[in-house]
Structures are given as C-alpha cells and as structure tokens.
Amino acid sequence: MKKTITLTFTRFYQDITGAMRSKSGVYMVYAYDKPTFEITHLLYIGESTDIYERLSVKYHQKDWLEKLKMDEEACYTYAVVTEEDRAGTHDAMIYHEQPVYNTMNTESFIHDDTEIIIKSKSVMEPEEKSYTVYRTK
C-alpha cells in the first residue's frame, strides 16, 4: 500500500536562529549563489524531532560550509512531518534526491512505497513537484 506525504516548505533561511525552534520534521540544506540568489545544489537532507537543535549543534555544518565555493552560502528549509512519518519521508527524499553529503539511504529504500509531494512557497524554489519511491528490499 502506497503512503502519500505532502510537505510544505515555506521559505529558505540563511540563519537558523529562531527560525526553526522546536519543529519536528525534515530539513534540506542547499548551496545558493550569493550574487544571483539562485539555488546551485542540494547539500543534505536531515530529520529531527527538533530541527533547530539539530542544526544549531552544527551536526554536519562544518562539512557543508567547507565545500562551498567562494560565491556560495548555505541556506535551510524545513517541513513539519509527524513522528510516525518522519523516518520514511526522510529516507524517501534521500533515495530520490541523492544529496551530496548524505551517505546512508542512497542505495536502497526499505519502507513501504511512498509518494512525496513537495510544495514550496519560496521565491528561490517556487515549484511544486512529486515523486514516488518504491521499496527496494
């Protein structure tokens, strides 16, 4: 049975301070070009019961920031996801998107088939997209 998860990403944050306090869900870290404000690539997808806490601990930030080009900076966006759906959503997104710094969940997907619908209200990524990830094992 296929599960459908709708995620709404409302904006991008350059600084996480106060932006994501006590939110449970998934987050995405992108590199963007400072002169044009255009997203260049997806760096990482993470999940947490408290996104702000996870990012403020600088869990992987050093890795991301060291690899940015001279005119790039990192930005963050997140979507609230229920505790029940968070791990499967996170894993489906990694399997499909293949971010640069995610090393787990890139080769297989162990959850039930999952349709991800991503809605973005950001001017940096104003599109809506959807995809289905199928169990591989």
Image (spheres, rainbow, N blue to C red):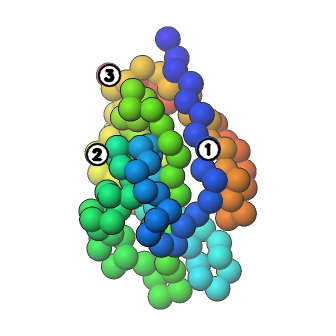
What percent of the width, then of the height, locates residue 18?
A: 46, 65
* SS at mark 2 in the image: loop
Q: Distance between the residues labelled 2 and 3?
A: 15 Å
Q: Quadrant of the C terminus?
A: top left
Q: Residue at x 61, y 44 (%)?
A: 8
The residue that disc 3 covers is: 137
Which of pointers 2 and 1 lies earlier in the amino acid sequence? Answer: 1
The residue that disc 2 covers is: 104
Q: How crowded is mark 1: few (under 14 residues within 10 Å), some or many (20 or more)?
A: some
Return the residue nearer the eye: 105 or 89: 89
| Amino acid residing under circle 1 | Thr
The residue that disc 1 covers is: 8
Q: Which residue is drawn at 46% across and 61% down?
A: 29
- The label nearer to you, 2 versus 1, is 1
Which of pointers 1 and 3 lies earlier in the amino acid sequence? Answer: 1
User: Is 84 positioned to the left or the right of 3 in the image?
Assistant: left
User: Is 115 positioned to the left or the right of 21 in the image?
Assistant: right
Q: How far apart are marks 2 and 1 (CA)?
A: 24 Å
* SS at mark 1 in the image: strand
What percent of the width, then of the height, locates residue 68?
A: 43, 78
Judge whether 63 appears above or below 86 on screen: below
| Amino acid residing under circle 3 | Lys
User: Is 12 positioned to the left or the right of 83 in the image?
Assistant: right
Are circles 2 and 1 on residues that touch, CB within 8 Å? Answer: no
| Amino acid residing under circle 2 | Met
* SS at mark 3 in the image: loop
Snapshot quadrant of residue 136? top left
